Image: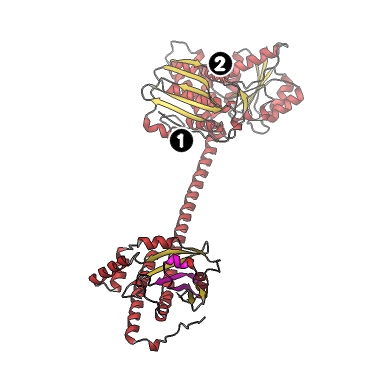
Amino acid sequence: MNTVLIVEDDRNLLRLYQAELETEGYRVVTASNGSEAAERVALETPDVIVMDIRMPGRDGLDTMAEILREYGRIPIILNTAYSSYLDDFLTWAAEAYIIKSGDLEPLKNKIREILAAHASPCDPPRNDDGR
Amino acid sequence: MSVQDLSQPSLAAVPLERRLAELTIFYEVGHALQRTMDQEKALCIILVGVTAGSGLGFNRAFILLLDEETQTLRGRMAIGPETPEEAHAIWRELQRNQETLGDLLNSILTNGIKKDKWINEVVSHIQIPLSDDTNPLVTILKSHEASRAANGLFLPHGLPVDEKLIRLFGTDEFAVAPLFLANKELGLLIADNAIARAPIDLANLRLLQIFAQEASAAIQNTRLHQRLIDQIKISEDQTITLRESQQQLLQLERLSTMGRLASLLAFRIRAPLASIGGFARRLLRVMPHEDARRDDLEIIVADVARLERLVGEVLAYRRISQPHFKPADVNALVCSVLATMHDEIQRNSVRAMLRLETDLPIAKIDEIQVRQALMNLVSNALEAMPAGGTLTVTTSVVTQFLEIEVGDTGIGIPEQNWNKLFKPFFTTKTTGTGLGLTIVSQVVENHSGLILFKSTPGQGTIFKLRLAINPEGKTVAPGGAASA
């Protein structure tokens, strides 16, 4: 069973993501800020991370940089209310970028796609904008 | 060479009657000059005073004024008949009407000026640079002393009268009186008796000089008055411009603050919106098909999706600034936009048709911006077809532009809205931001392109986006709208 780490400071949204992704059959672990996220990665070794960008304390971009540095290439999907991050080079290290929406299909599809790609060593990792 | 003293003949030698007549002329002219600040009228009054039979009685008079900017003496106005016949006709007319100098001057003040055409044409060509010291008129002006040209000499200056001046004035005998005030040269007052061929005596020259002094004060007054009016006008214009700039700045500041607030609000709203929409979808999935409450949930889902689009537009508008151009396949982009909006297209019972140019060159575009513009256009097209219809997206090459055409078979845009379409916050929808087409036009402008549209109410609308294939290589072509 694949593990998905969701990093999100909005509790309701966190609950929604957790419920939806568990329904999809994933093991879901959660963190509500950057520091917690780093701890979870160390403990749970997630297969994919869904990361909010704007969070109190350490933001998602710093957290992403630290995780990639400390734990190697874990696919990270940036999930935020901003649409302008697409232009920002800081987001380039992310596997995908998805704008927060009540329609979770794009996020679910992206997770599925990433896990499938990473499951097969022949497939090079994808890097697109996730839309 | 003899030099004559202008102070001769002395006042004592002038008969009392003549002195009274002279004083009357000065009084009448001075009185008329006091009643106008208009330079044209003042010049005319001076010239009439010089030439009227009841005035100084010269046949013709000319005024040259110094153009301060170019330091050139320029012919400004003149009075005088062209021929002896014309002169006699005028004199007969004046005799018949029995008009006094006062009457003549009053008529100028109340009825305006009738200029003698021929002589004013002559005077308008006179241009003498003040730096031309070889010109005796310049020397006379700088000397502040009147002079009489006769027998080839200016007296008392003792300067030769050259052929050019004789040709210019059409006579070899004339009087020149400098116009000046407190060492400041203003111009020249020139008079002659070329029609009657009467000599100009020293008394006439003396009178002209005194007259010129009065005229100088009047001319300077009108100049100062005009300058004051000009400065007031400039000052008023500057005040208006300043006020307008302040208003614009305030407006910009307000818009900028509103923009920041709007994007902050939009940003903050996105998470709770996603949560509401997400949970509603979740509930909808588990709710039995026969449950009547499904309709309520569907309304929540649809409205949240609509709000999310609105929020997206507000945030997109804030970020449509500096484009980042990268080579892109516009056909692929069009397909991707339609795929993203597939559900919405289906929901609106709209048939989507693609007509893609197979040889489309790779263009340098900001893919995110163009995607946003296309999504806005497609979204508008769908809203224009509430009862379904056909959406047609076409790509082609038009000279150095890539053209993307989005057409619908919807309700069309009423003609009265055509010129407002691209203005920020203009909307006909109850829930629109009025930013959709503003974003489109901004994107097109960023791509050195243009927008064309054609709309027939009841039949549909076509928007054409023309994007420069290499926008960085182009210099002009702001976004614009044309319609038919």
Residue found at x 23% / y 70% = B97
Residue B467, position in %: x, y? 54, 28
Element marked by disc 2: loop
**B412 shown above or below B32:** above
Chain assignment, label 2:
B
Q: Which mark is residue B423?
A: 1
In the picture, measured across the screen, residue B305 lies left or right of residue A61, that is left
Residue B328, position in %: x, y? 61, 23
Residue found at x 39% / y 62% = B120
Amino acid beneath label 2? Thr
Q: Is residue B363 visible?
A: yes
Evaluate whether label 1 is on the same chain as label 2. Answer: yes
Q: Quadrant of residue A121?
A: top right
The residue singled out by tag 2 in the image is B358
Magenta stretch: includes residue B157 = no
**B34 shown above or below B372:** below
Q: Is residue B37 visible?
A: no
Amino acid beneath label 1? Lys
Residue found at x 63% / y 17% = A111
Residue B359, position in %: x, y? 57, 17
Q: Nearer the viewer, mark 1 or mark 2?
A: 2
Q: Quadrant of residue B469?
A: top right
Chain assignment, label 1:
B
